[in-house]
Image (cartoon, grey):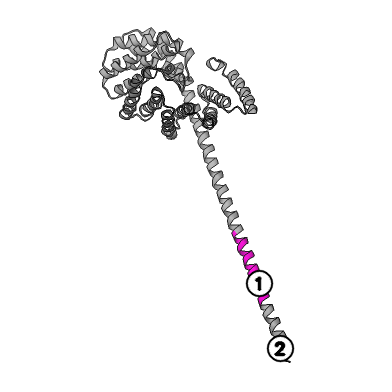
């Protein structure tokens, strides 16, 4: 419960206490779940080192207990921590493993989850809307085969597990990037209608939809409709701010909303509103820049540690090779010594035999 409030430190203390208890009891399932919760808190507070460590521990333990869905969830979350820290080289490997585990678990709707994460990766990280659409359509096929729009085993609170709405939003953003604006509005509108407005965890995800819809209206020069969507997004933003699952999301969406609203109000001559929105935009932008700077430092730290570990392994291998050479040299020396002693004994035996032979005949 604390992990969904400002008291993340209390959540960590309690979970680490649980970790110690379950470790002593050797209860692998509950220990794996505790690791998963610690990893999730690390993800929320943007501590990539903490989240990655606990994710890996959780995955290993879940696999030991014969689970399929839960290690898939951990792999999906781990891929997101990598994206968050801009360490994207291993994202597809994690998601491919998650997809295989989801298929083994055999729940059709859940197979869509890693596919839509792949769609997000290609669109938002690689700037490739065509590849993203391919995975979105694959995800949509699994969604339409199911009689529900909710994931059974969800990897986080993203869309409260409403995979259908989530898929439609990513598809809408793909069409926006491809400048197919009618399809974009259709997909984004479908995503908004699929969300449960009575559920605060789903209602809050209307905000990124509002941003995307506003951007489409700006592209087609429907500025009145764009301002209407932006204003609605700002009304909802305070609620979203309290329910956000990632620190950077609050600053990212806040920054975008206020900048768009400021520009649109300026266009309509509402200078006071434009100024006030720009002030708020500056505050969120500064917070976002600080966050990104921290992520760059974290990435540098992780890469440095990895390089340091790699160098340590190289030195260790080199030392082992030197030791093996020394052992081989020592073995060869011993062999030569024994051979020399043996040869010397043979010579001495021959000399002794000759000496005795001479004595006998004299």
Residue 169: x and y in percent read 35, 19
**Residue sitting at 58 percent across and 57 percent down?**
325
**Residue sitting at 60 percent across and 64 percent down?**
332
Which residue is nearer to you in this view: 315 or 269? 315
Find residue 153 and name its label: none
Q: Give the residue number, with chain letter if any, for mark 1.
A: 342
Is residue 351 magenta-colored?
A: no
Q: Main secondary structure of the magenta part?
A: helix
Q: Give the residue number, with chain letter if any, for mark 2.
A: 358
**Mark closer to the chain start, 1 or 2:** 1
**Residue sitting at 49 percent across and 27 percent down?**
74
Asked where in the image residue 26 lies, by quadrant, the reply is top right
Query: Is residue 262 visible to us here?
Result: no
Which residue is nearer to you in this view: 117 or 213? 117
SS label for mark 1:
helix
Q: Residues within 10 Å of mark 2 (few under 14, many from 20)?
A: few
Q: In which quadrant will I find the C terminus?
A: bottom right
SS label for mark 2:
helix
Which residue is nearer to you in this view: 113 or 293? 113
Q: In which quadrant will I find the N terminus?
A: top right
Give the extent of the magenta segment. Answer: 328-346
Residue 238: x and y in percent read 45, 10
Q: Is residue 57 left or right of residue 122?
A: right
Is residue 335 magenta-colored?
A: yes
Q: How many marks?
A: 2
Query: Is residue 186 visible to us here?
Result: yes
Find out whether the residues at labels 1 and 2 contact each other: C-beta distance under 8 Å: no
Q: Is residue 361 left or right of residue 211?
A: right
């Amino acid at each position: 419960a604390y992990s969904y409030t400002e008291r993340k430190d209390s959540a960590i203390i309690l979970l680490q206490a649980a970790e110690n208890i379950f470790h002593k009891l050797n209860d692998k399932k509950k220990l794996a779940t505790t690791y998963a919760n610690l990893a999730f808190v690390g993800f929320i507070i943007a501590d990539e080192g903490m989240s990655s460590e606990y994710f890996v521990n959780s995955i290993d333990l879940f696999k030991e207990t014969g689970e399929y869905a839960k290690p898939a969830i951990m792999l999906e979350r781990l891929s997101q921590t990598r994206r968050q820290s801009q360490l994207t080289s291993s994202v597809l490997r994690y998601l491919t493993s998650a997809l295989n585990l989801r298929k083994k678990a055999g729940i059709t709707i859940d197979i869509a989850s890693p596919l839509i994460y792949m769609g997000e990766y290609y669109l938002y990280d690689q700037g490739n809307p065509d590849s993203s659409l391919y995975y979105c359509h694959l995800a949509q096929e699994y969604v339409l085969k199911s009689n529900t729009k909710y994931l059974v085993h969800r990897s986080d609170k993203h869309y409260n597990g409403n995979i259908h709405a989530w898929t439609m939003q990513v598809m809408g953003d793909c069409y926006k990037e491809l400048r197919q604006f009618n399809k974009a509005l259709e997909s984004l509108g479908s995503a908004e209608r699929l969300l449960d407005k009575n559920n605060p965890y789903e209602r809050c995800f209307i905000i990124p939809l509002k941003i995307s819809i506003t951007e489409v209206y700006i592209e087609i020069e429907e500025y009145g409709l764009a301002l209407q969507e932006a204003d609605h997004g700002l009304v909802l933003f305070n609620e979203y701010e309290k329910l956000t699952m990632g620190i950077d999301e609050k600053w990212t969406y806040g920054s975008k909303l206020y900048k768009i609203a400021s520009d649109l109000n300026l266009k309509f001559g509402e200078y006071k509103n434009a100024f006030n929105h720009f002030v708020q935009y500056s505050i969120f932008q500064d917070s976002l820049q600080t966050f990104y700077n921290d992520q760059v430092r974290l990435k540098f730290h992780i890469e440095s540690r990895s390089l340091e570990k790699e160098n340590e392994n190289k030195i260790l291998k080199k030392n082992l090779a030197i030791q093996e050479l020394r052992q081989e040299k020592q073995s060869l020396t011993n062999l030569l010594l024994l051979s020399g002693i043996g040869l010397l004994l043979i010579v001495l035996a021959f000399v002794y035999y000759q000496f005795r032979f001479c004595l006998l005949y004299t």
